[in-house]
Structure formats: C-alpha cells, structure tokens
Image (cartoon, rainbow, N blue to C red):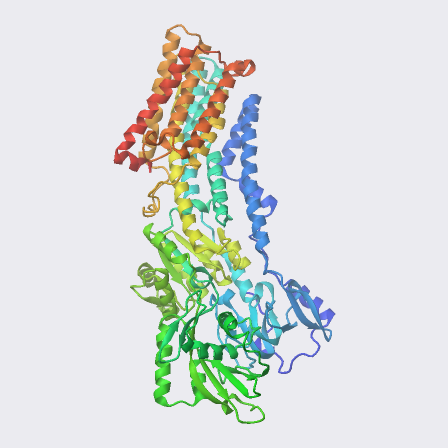
Amino acid sequence: MNIPRPITLAAVPVEPMSKGLTSLQVEQQREKYGSNSIPDSAVRSVFGIAKEILTEPMLLLLLAAATLYLLIGDLAEGLLLAGFAILTIGLVFYQQQRSEKALAALRNLGAPTAHVLRDGKECTVPGADVVPQDVVLLDEGERIPADGFLLICSGLVVDESLLTGESVPVRKRTSHEDVKAEPGGDDQPFVYSGTLVVKGHGIALVSDTGPRTRAGRIGVSLASIVVEQTRLQITVGRIVRIFGILAVLVCCALILFYGFFRQDWLQGILSGIALAMGMLPEEFPVVLTIFLAIGAWRLAQVKVLARRPAVIETLGAATNLCVDKTGTLTENRMRVRLLDILSEHFSVGADSKNIPQTFRPLLHAAWLATRRSSIDPMDRAVVGLASPAFEPDTVWPMVREYALTPELLAMSIVWKDDTGHFIVACKGAPEAVIELCHLSEERKAKIMDHVRVMAEQGVRVLGIATGTTSMDKLPESQHEFEFAFTGLVGFEDPLRPSVPAAVREASRAGVCVKMITGDYPATALAIAASAGIDISNGAVTGDQIKQAGDAQLQHLVASVNVFARIMPEQKLRIVEALKSQGEIVAMTGDGVNDAPALKAAHIGIAMGKRGTDVAREAAGLVLLDEDFGSIVRALKVGRRIFDNLRKVMIYIAAIHVPIAGLALLPLVFNMPPLFFPAHVVIIEMIIDPMCSIVFERTAAEANIMDRPPRQVDDPLVGIPQIIFGLVQGGVLLIFCLALYRGLLFEDYSVEVSRTATFIAVTAGNLSLVFANSTRESALLHLFDRGRMSFWIAASIAAVIVTICILHPSLAELFGFTRPTIELVLLAAGGGLSVVLLFDLIKLFPAVRRIVG
C-alpha cells in the first residue's frame, strides 16, 4: 500500500522549531492525516463474531434441520434441535469473547503519552493526538509516539527491537545528509513509532503518524495476506457435504417410494425425515465445537491463548517451527557471560555470585564506567552483577561523564575517590578503547584475536580501561587521559532455560526448528547450537536470500536451519518458500517485523507480554507466558486433538449405520416403523455429544510425540477408517434388526420390541465409544483412572434411557413400554458384546494403524 509521507528529510529545519505547532495547525494536521493510530481491523466486534459463527456451514446444517421440523409442525423435535443450536452458538461465542477480552488486556503499547511543544509550551498529550510536524521531546524510558527526524539529541540510544528483532539498542545522531531510513543502524537521525528510548534525550520533528509510520505500514500490509482454512475445516466440510447430499437423495427416494407405491405421502415424509436425521451428521458442529473450545481452554491452562481455535488442529500437522532468536529462544535481555583479562578468562554462570579475585578489578572498572540508573541492557547487566560486590564499599561522587560519540565509540566516567584523586573508567567498542590506551601493534592484535574468539561464541564485546590524570582540571577530551587496558567483558542474550528440552522434543516429534534472526551469523549459529538446533549446514544470510530466486530459495530453506541478518520481508519469503514445498509452517515472533510472516504461516504464534499489538492480531495463538516450552506442549495438544477427532469420527460413522438402518430397513421389509424422529434426536443430540466429551477427555497416546507429523495429504478420516466404522456399525445393525424382528416374530408388541431394540442401540452406542476411544485394546484398561469420564457418561445415558422408558409422558412420546428384566439383559448384553469384539481385534497392529 503506497501511503504518501507528509514530510521528508529535506524539509527538516536546520534550527529547531522554538514554539512548535499552534492549536489551529494541530487541528488542520489532524483533519488532513487523521489520528496517530493504526485501524484495527483484526479486532472482532460482537456482531462480527456472531456473523462468523452463524455462517459456519456445519452449524447452518443444524439450524436448517431444526427449521425443517418446525415447518412440518413437529414442535418437540424442532425446539429440541433449536435448543442445541443455541447452546452451540453460545459456547463458541463465549470462547471467542474470552479470547478477545484477553487480547484487549494485552494492548499496552498502542496509545502512549507524548511530550510535545505546542504554542511555545511543553505539554503532555495522548499518543493518538500527535500529528505530523509536531515537535516531540524524547527522554529516557519513554516510547516514541511517531516516526520522525532528530533536531537535537544528546547521547540518545534507542531500543528498536520491535522493528528489528535485535536486543542491542542503537545510537542516534542529528544529520541533514541524504541517508536512507532503516531501523537498526547506528548514527542515524531517524526515530520510529513504538521504539523505546533507553539512554539520553532529544527533540524530534514528527514526519509520519498512524498507518504512515514504519510499524503502521507493516500493520496495513497484513490486510493483503489471506488466512487459509485449516485442513480440519476443509476435510470436515467435505464430509458434511457428502453425507448431506447422500441423505437428501435417499430421503427423496424414500418419500417418492411411499408416495407412488404405497399412496402414503405423509408417512413417507415423516420416514424420510427420520432417515435423513439418521444419516445427516448434525452432531459434527457439536463435536467440533466441544473439541476446539475445550482444546482452547486446555491451552489457556498452560498460558497459550487461542485467538482462532480452529488453528489448534493444524498444530498436530506442523512440520517446521520458524522462531525468532531474540525474545523467543532468548530472554531479550543482556547478562555478563565472559570476563577476559587476556592472560585468562572466566565464564560467568547465570547465577554466579563469587567472581574470582583475579577478575574483580576488571568487573570493578566496568562497574565504574556505568551509570547506576541506566536502562541500557548491557549497563543493567553490569550493574546487576557488580553492585552487590562493590556498592557497599565504593561510595564516590561522580564528577563528570564523557559521552560516546560517532567519532569515538567509547564513554568514560570520572569519579573522585576517598583520597581526592580522580579515577577514570572507560568502556566501549574494543577498537575505540585500544585507541585510547595507545597500545603497541602486537598488543592490539592479541586483544583483537580475543575479541574475534568471543564474537564467535555469540557474545557482544566491550573493552574496559581505567585511567588517571595529573591535571587539576579535567580535560575536554577522553584522549587526554592516561588509560591502561583492563580487559574485555562479553555479554549475551541468554537462552531461555526451557528451550533445549523443547527443541529436543520437537525434533523427536519430527518438527524441524529453524531460527530466523536479524543478528550476525556467528551469534546466530552460537545461539542455535546452544538451543540444540542442527547447524551442520551453516547459516544463510539476508543478502544470499535477496539474490536467490524462488527455486534456489526453496532449496536453501529445505537444507538450512539458521537464517541471519534477515529483513522482515525476507521472513515472509522464507515462510512462503516452505509452504510452497508442502510444509506446514508454525512461526513465532513478538515484533512488528514478524507480523506479515505470522499471518502468512499456517500457525502464527505471537508473544503475549513482549509482543506488539500488530503481531498479536496477526497470530492465531498468543503465548501469554512467553515460555518456548509451551509451544511444544501446544504441538502435543494439537496432535492429541487430531487423534481423538479421528477416533470420534470413526465412532460417528459407526453409530450412524444402525440409526439410519433401523429407520429404513423395517419399512423396506414391511415391518412396523421402529424409529421416529424423536428417537433419532434423543440418540444423536443427547447421547452422542455426551460421548464426544469422553473422546475429548481421552489422554494422549503414549507415543504421540515420538511419531512424525502426519502427512500433509493425510485426511482426518480416510477410506480405511470409514470402512472400519461402517463394519462396526453394520454388525450392531444386524444384531438390533434381528432382535426387533425376532421379538415381533415371538408376538411381542411393537412397543416392547421397540423399547428392547432402543436399549440395544444405546448399549451398542456406549460400547462403540469404549472400543474406539483408544488405539490399544480398551478392555486391557477397563478401570483405568482415565476411564472415569466414560463411566460417568455411561451412567448418564442409562439414566436418560430409563427415564424415557419409565416416565409415562415420555414413554408415550417415544412409543415405549416397560420391558421385562430378561429382555433388558438380552438387549443390553447383546449390544455391548457384539461391538466389543472389535476392541479385541485391535490387538493386531494393522487394525491399530487404521484407528490411529
């Protein structure tokens, strides 16, 4: 999207604007350019959520069935179906609303306040009120409210990790030269909306606001990326269409048969509706809603928010997990890792408190060269490590600070010790500190060799020196001090503790972890190796990707797991290249730069605390605790959901055979009607969803994370699973039909025969649930603790059937009568025993493969 900019670098005044805009000018600018906010199209309103739910094809099927019953005057069945439709809508709506409210609580970066100069006075306004050509005052610890150009700055250092992904802040300086605006570079005059001032202060002229800012343009570009349907949505939609077309055809055929050959159109319509209800999988929306809603709830328990519950299913198929280094694999903070005094070095542990005496002078010098109140990440790391050791004993007044400049990338702080002497401590880029120390070429080379070795370990290096002065008055330049080189301090952005184990588990599950970062290759490879990511093929840089064509890029992404110096648009190319090869891609990220790739990936996973609004709105999942291990737990949840959905689909296919068969075959064989619509409703809309909860609560198979991801073209339910379910249902149908025919042949009344057959179907239904709820033989785990939900469901089903039989009004509605104990035992025992035979044959591996 091409958005014109209201001001360019050439238009920046040489002298700062002394008064800022007038109130009238502010209104004119706001009228012309709008509010300093990004239109949030991703936030769904109540009506938007309702529309999304009501246009779901599977739910429309349920509503259509309810409407059909009401139109023919069957009020009881129509209201029953309508009630379940309302319950389904309510459940989905509740989950969606909870997700949106949780996200709203996370939007803490969208509207910072801003200090501006207007009408000649300094004032504080909401960030959304900032307009182009405003003069903004920037101070340490504040977020920059808009993009702009620096007019004045003093030691200004800005954290631009939201745009670049890198935790190390960058220096800023004023300039009127024609330079390219690019986040992440040192000594540039540009500042960007949403970034954080970590040191110094300055005055900036606003150039862009709202959607014209760097962050805003990325957010606007998300609208062009289409969110794909999950494979579950596609597969289930296809199954529903097939069942629906088949049901309509058979229903019409039965109505025509009754009308033309038996001259009984009313009975034909009623029987056709009962048959269609038996064939239509109207429990699918209930089952899917339960699985996805409860799956989202389970993820929430481990601090993963599902913005789009349907994406949970895709987790189980993920083959590639693309992660950003900073803030995802690492903690997005700095800590001291190495102390090097050239003759020896010391590796500082995460909880090191006792620094060897040999290295204490180096640490003390680094501490003296650091302001205690600084919020710079490396300064905070030094203060955090050194203050407990030195602060109680060193209470010296600070006399002067020499700021870092583009010409000399080092800074010094002068202290006056207890004897009145000046103590100078210096830190900065090793090359700059070496220059201040006036070292020999041989010693310079030795120090730089140490710097190179440390850099190869993925650490950032500062040189440290101490100095004195014999002058009574402090010099104007750091060069006039007599410095002695003290040593090198190495910093790292530490790896999250949970990462190595999570990467190992992901690899064991066949999920390839790829690291995509804007950092340097050496640092990226070191972090990747620490995390356990395969680095055998080295790293690919952003320049290589820029030069690569689509075919070459596909080869690179297939063979390399570390990508360094990557720009935001290149992250998107990497994701698209993986997708073009048939990979199912999960992408994690927290910055604005990650948002396009998050939305393009099959599974976008944003960080909750550190993540930007743009990233969170683009993602399907939000990691609330930012624990990388939670991602792997989410992968396991996704696999468990798919496994259990496959089991429940086999069960649904099986139970529809006796329901539809018992509605049709008695009529074909000229027997009294067995099932009316009310019987079908009670079986499908009460017992089946209740049993579906049993499937959802079924624990994950023991080897679920030892299996590779399922194939991309592996359907939820294939031909083998359908056949297995139909055979199970067919055996139950044969028994129930034989029971009904046998009882009628023995001169039992239609009501008694119907009651006994209904008991057999209910018992068979429960045995189908029991047999299909695990890949292993369920009989071997009959009374496991995990089976409690089954026994509860079985008890509830038994109570429902008993009430329907014994309650006079319900018995009359359903055409039941009280059977003898012998008939109850015969029907229930037969229904249970026939289908349990299929549990025994799962002892054969080939059958287990079909189920799982």
The x and y percentages for residue 550 are: 35, 62
Q: Residue 638: x and y, percent?
A: 41, 45
- Is 281 situated above or below 306? above
Whether residue 72 is visible here, answered yes or no, is: no
Residue at position x 53%, y 40% in the image:
55
Instruction: Provide residue 37's location: percent of width, then percent of height.
Output: 61, 61
Q: In front: 171, or 480? A: 480
Can you tell which quarter of the image residue 431 is in? bottom left
Please name whichever residue, 153 or 599, is drawn nearer the observer in this view of the structure: 153
Q: Nearer the viewer, residue 797 or 76?
A: 797
Between 484 and 663, the residue placed more toward the observer is 484
- Residue farthest to the bottom? 471
Instruction: Please give the count of numbered marks on the rendered protein.
Output: 0
**Left or right: where 763 falls relative to 81:** left
Q: What's the residue at 60%, 76% (across, down)?
A: 201
Answer above or below: position of 697 versus 712: above
**As displayed, is residue 422 above or below residue 208?**
below
Task: Name the image quarter holding residue 807.
Answer: top right
Quarter in which the C terminus is drawn: top left
Residue 17 can be seen, yes or no: yes
Image position, residue 767 (x, y; %): 38, 26
Question: Which residue lies at the image location 39% right of the left edge and 10% below the top edge?
Answer: 743
